[in-house]
Image: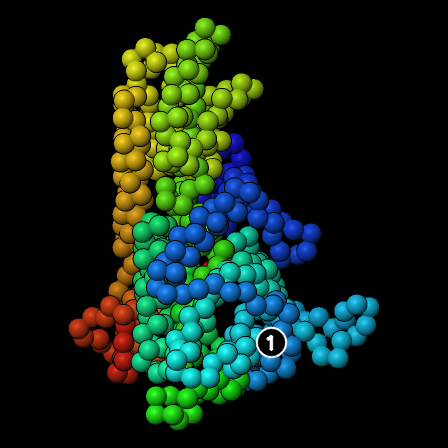
Amino acid sequence: MAEKITPQSEDFSRWYTDIVLRAELADYAPVKGCMIIRPYGYTLWENIQAALDKRFKDTGHVNAYFPMLIPESYLRKEAEHVEGFSPELAVVTHGGGKKLEEPLVVRPTSETIINAMYAKWVRSYRDLPLLINQWANVIRWEMRTRLFLRTAEFLWQEGHTVHASAQEAEEETLRMLNVYKDFAENEMAMPVVTGQKSLVEKFAGALASYSIEAMMGDTRALQSGTSHYFGQQFAKAFGIQFLNRDNELEYAYQTSWGVSTRLVGALIMVHGDDQGLILPPRLAPIQVVIVPIWRNEDQKQKVLEATDQIRRQLAGQFRIELDDREEYSPGWKFNEWEMKGVPLRVEIGPKDVDKSQVVLVRRDVAGKERKSFVPMTNLDAQVGDMLETIQAAMFNRALQFREKNSFRPTTYEELTEAVMKGFAYVPWCGSAECEAKVKDDTKATTRCIPFDQPETVGPCIVCGAEASSEVIFARAY
């Protein structure tokens, strides 16, 4: 199976598509730009969803659901918002065989319809904060698509909150950004940079946007999650007002934040290799695959009895798969499970049974060090320790890769070279003109203004004027 994968060094884009298709994560849908998420890929998304949903609920948020069809007039209530999404809108003009009195937009995001309901629900400061999240699908009519990374329809979550003060809303915006950072680094084993988006790159309708930015295996950036502070803009557009503690009518303050199935693409590109997926144990649909090995019927009975003991020892503690198919060779099975990125393989043959041991094979490393021989006694504890070791090793490897491919150029010429190799941290004056020049010259964009700033910032690397902050320029997906 691995022979069918295009090597990363030959064509990273083709390699990525090969992985998605061969590992049975997704397939192309009949409608151009859409994808079908296959069971293995959807289980991976469910694990992402579960880990995030727990974090949302631990911070006081609750889930709800809003319609996917939005009256066109709702989008036009906030001018910047509709302008930002106009090129991507899918619009329904007929229903039930008749032309609709008002066209309905298939949601590209749900700020407008949710805010229309918030205007009905919010009356007093006692109703606040309102902390609601939605798991849903959205449609954005993308012209250039790639499975998981950018499709016309995708799955995501979108949080929409309402607060009594600007301070509370701003704290919520950053709190949820940190939730995303915690999830990315501790569940995905993916190091991220947190920071503020430039005015050019911010979300349409937001006063400020923040993001987590990750480096992929080809050194390009991927915006992996965003959190937005809206201030009172949507509240004024939709009439979301409340009586404050002084019994005065006041407009509410709002936030919005979201991540999508793009995270599946991030997992592939951060960790995968030429053999296929490498999945972090905490999110992998299958954490451990057990492969019994035998050559004849006498060996088969003995091996399968031992295998059943192993299965019962690990079941309930880990997500396991027993591969006792007889129509495939052990080597073929090894390749298949490596393709699918299963973090740990347990092999057991007749000699292992005689020695009361198994062979543990790690997916995340190569060579002799990936194999270890361990006793069957207390195997569950050893498997647990090994999975934690793999999780930590994957994060550290990705962090080292990012650091190796991050640069601090001191001239504009060096900047144009650095963005072809990874992240370029440079002083920037904050002007849209300098931002546009870099994009025109290199196709690199500002990813974020990192929260972690140096003590001193030199002159803008583009124009030489006084710089306001250090920013990351990089080519991105």
Residue at 47%, 46% (x, y): give it. 44
**Residue at the extreme right of the image, as rendered:** 97
Q: Nearer the viewer, residue 417 or 44?
A: 44
371 in relation to 43, above or below: above
Residue at 26%, 83% (x, y): give it. 466
How many other residues sit within 10 Å of disc 1, few (<14), some (14-19) or many (≥20)? few
100 in relation to 29, above or below: below
**Residue at the extreme left of the image, as rendered:** 455
Is 100 left, or right, of 436 in this rendering?
A: right
Count of labels shown? 1
Residue 81 is at least partly visible in this image: no
Please state the horizontal and vertical placement of residue 416, each as a whole percent of the image.
36, 66
53 in relation to 211, above or below: above
Is 297 left, or right, of 75 in this rendering?
A: left
Q: Nearer the viewer, residue 455 or 205?
A: 205
**Residue at the extreme top of the image, as rendered:** 298
Q: Quadrant of residue 146?
A: bottom right
Please state the horizontal and vertical placement of residue 194, each as a whole percent of the image.
32, 65
The coloring applied to the image is rainbow
Residue 261 is at least partly visible in this image: yes
Regarding mark 1 in the picture, which secondary structure is present there? helix
460 in relation to 188, above or below: below
Q: Which residue is mark 1?
A: 86
**In the image, what residue type sits under mark 1?**
Ser
Q: Quadrant of residue 8?
A: top left
Please state the horizontal and vertical placement of residue 397, each as a whole percent of the image.
29, 46
Residue at 33%, 78% (x, y): give it. 168
Residue at 29%, 40% (x, y): give it. 388
